[in-house]
Image: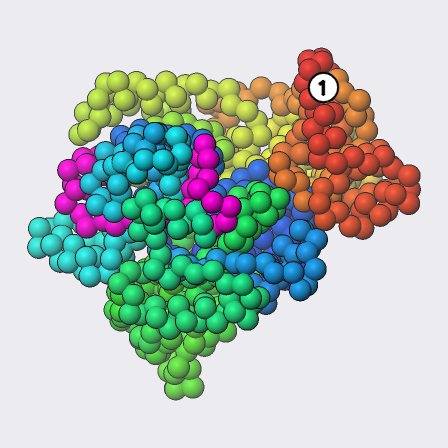
Amino acid sequence: MPADLSEAEAANALMRLAREIARHDRLYHAEDAPEITDAEYDALVRRNAEIEAAFPHLVRPDSPSRKVGHQIAASPLGKVTHEVRMMSLDNAFSREEVAEWLARMRRFLALPEDAPMAITAEDKIDGLSCSLRYEKGVLVRAATRGDGQVGEDVTANVAHIPDVPPTLPKGVPAIFEVRGEVYMEKQAFTALNAAQHEAGGKIFANPRNAAAGSLRQKDAGVTAKRPLRFWAHGWGAASALPGKTQSEVVAALRGWGFPVSPLFTRIDGGADELIAHFDAIGTARPSLPYDIDGVVYKLDRLDWQERLGFVAKAPRWALAHKFPAERAETVVQAIDIQVGRTGKLTPVGRLAPVLVGGVTVTNVTLHNRDEIARLGLRVGDRVVIQRAGDVIPQVVENLTREEPRAAFVFPDHCPECHSEAVAEEGEVDVRCTAGLICPAQRTQRLEHFVSRKALDIEGLGEKTIAQFYALGWLESPADIYRLKQRRADILALEGWQEKSVDNLLAAIEAKRAPDAARLLFALGIRHVGEVTARDLMKHFHTLAALRAMATLANADRLPFASSEVERQMREGVSTALDTNGDVAAQARAELTAIDGIGPSVVEALGDFFHEPHNVAVWEDLLSEVSPPRYEVKTLASRVAGKTVVFTGKLETMSRDEAKAQAERLGAKAAGSVSAKTDLLVAGPGAGSKLKKAAELGIETTDEAGWAAIVAEALGGGGAG
């Protein structure tokens, strides 16, 4: 439970979840190649939401709760900026959550319990979101959702979908964006895969992937040959609306020639009636010609929708009630161990192929050593698995755990490099201790090193890194900067043109003086995420000073040679330490006094600098790059030198963004209210902190007031 986490643990958990969810968003939305089930994805999102609710001040700028879909990378289809953002939907998985959603809307609208509140309900088709823009009744543009702000231009492709009318009847609004789903029916999907198999083409995992891959073809002629369908469920930009309720507008869409859900209905009752309709659709689900994964509820009255508005990525007035995952039985034929970028050993079950919800699945993630023990899982066991629309399922139950069979022994050494593999105290994950020298971790760590939030070196993608690694050109981050010596070798490779090689080498050379915090984050040190890296560098300013302090802080825990400690001290640290006292304790105290830095970060830094191979990589890298002294410029503002606390739900920014703003204005962003607090910024849902601030007579403002303070400072333009 989030309540069991320390603040540092919560921050690191949110960092890991943000990365993991972003990766799965990319696989699902951008590459049409999901690796986990909908149920597993939903579990990750719910875990993130639970931790954010318990630690609202730790909400990250890249939080999944603030993002929709996935950012569109370079695409031959071109990009389209949506005039009105395409939102996602919040999910519910139980009657209680649906009832709470209804109650929450009543409270927001100040409606009495007996006041009627009509809700529409329709089956949630498993397709690809698409927006169709009509001007004066003529289709002028079609775009995918993308990240909600920018999607891909699929106008030419959509023109081949028979359900999409090229023109609308007379009298429609001058501008109207119809939004809905592009999908493929089950029977058409089966026929397409059979044809693909016969032609030696790509086999699609499920109808949703087939629809997405078919719509996003560079050649619209390929799309024309695919059996795509479309149905409408909403709208975006509109110069006028043909109704005052959701029901009336959907009826108008149907009248204009758009297919809508045949199960669309309006329900005037409460949660019981909604659940009854949900159950009825669930019963009909197997016989439907298309895949669905839930039911969507929307408040019918549009004026009430407008009053309720939106949270970060979803409307308050709509909810997706998801079906429980589908299940099947199969046998575990093998348990393999995979090694990730951070050295985590992840067990993967290899299954006897089984059909679940129309998709053949052969793999299942077993998460960690404790999960295998909880299930009592061994090779040969018969298990119940579940999925909710994708290929890799999860194990629900071991049906043969009581049968006599040899137990699975989780390895205590890395299967790739044979180094020791251990679990840190209090953690369930077992990790390889070899770090940067483990072959399984090297390419993934290099990918992290050049990623957008780290060094951001364009042109060094996963395939290029794998290719150069296989050739022996890339083994450590410093090797990236030596690639210029291999220009001729790279040009000799198939597929490389002179311009692309020179662009890559120029991108690398542009990062010879990288931001020190980005460089620290890029190294992938345990518990040192991008926020932690910035916090450390703001305090120490140079990487040499950070290394010295981290080494000293762990001098009594790790077997450093005394000469090494003395050498580190001679290099100088950010604060003069009393060499007659407990130097290690003083160094730890300085590190943990930094806001957001806890014992786990101190220990991780010590572990990193204790390993000779890590130090070798560190020194090799710093022989190639020269990060300037890290300084954070501040603006002159009326909160400069003051302590600011943020509480409640911030609706226009994340906690990290708000904290960054405060720091730029010369203020300190604290996590709790005390007599030293100068200003409390309270969003909706502010509780105990707001009450304590009132008791202490601390100045309080809302999010708009804080925005005014920021705008005032930006307008002044003074730097401190």
What residue span does the magenta drawing correspond to?
217-246
- Could you tell me which secondary element the residue under label 1 belongs to? helix
Task: Quadrant for residue 450, please give it.
Answer: top left
> Which residue is depicted at the point 29% across and 65% down?
288
417 horizontally vs 157: left or right: right
State the image coordinates of residue 392 (x, y, percent, origin top left): 35, 61
Q: Is residue 202 magenta?
A: no
99 horizontally vs 507: left or right: right
Near-viewer residue (47 or 228): 228
Which amino acid does the dot numbered 1 rest on?
Ala
Q: Does the magenta stretch include residue 236?
A: yes
State the image coordinates of residue 334 (x, y, percent, origin top left): 31, 69
> Which residue is depicted at the point 66% across and 23% down?
632
- Is 279 above or below relative to 532? below
Would residue 689 be seen by someone viewing this image from the given angle? yes
615 horizontally vs 566: left or right: left
Q: Mark 1 points at which residue?
A: 713
> Which residue is depicted at the point 35% across and 56% down?
261
Near-viewer residue (445 or 504): 504
Scheme by which the image is coloured: rainbow
Near-viewer residue (368 or 316): 316
- Is 262 above or below relative to 501? below
Would residue 14 be seen by someone viewing this image from the given angle? no
Q: In which quarter of the image is the C terminus?
A: top right
State the image coordinates of residue 18 (x, y, percent, origin top left): 52, 46
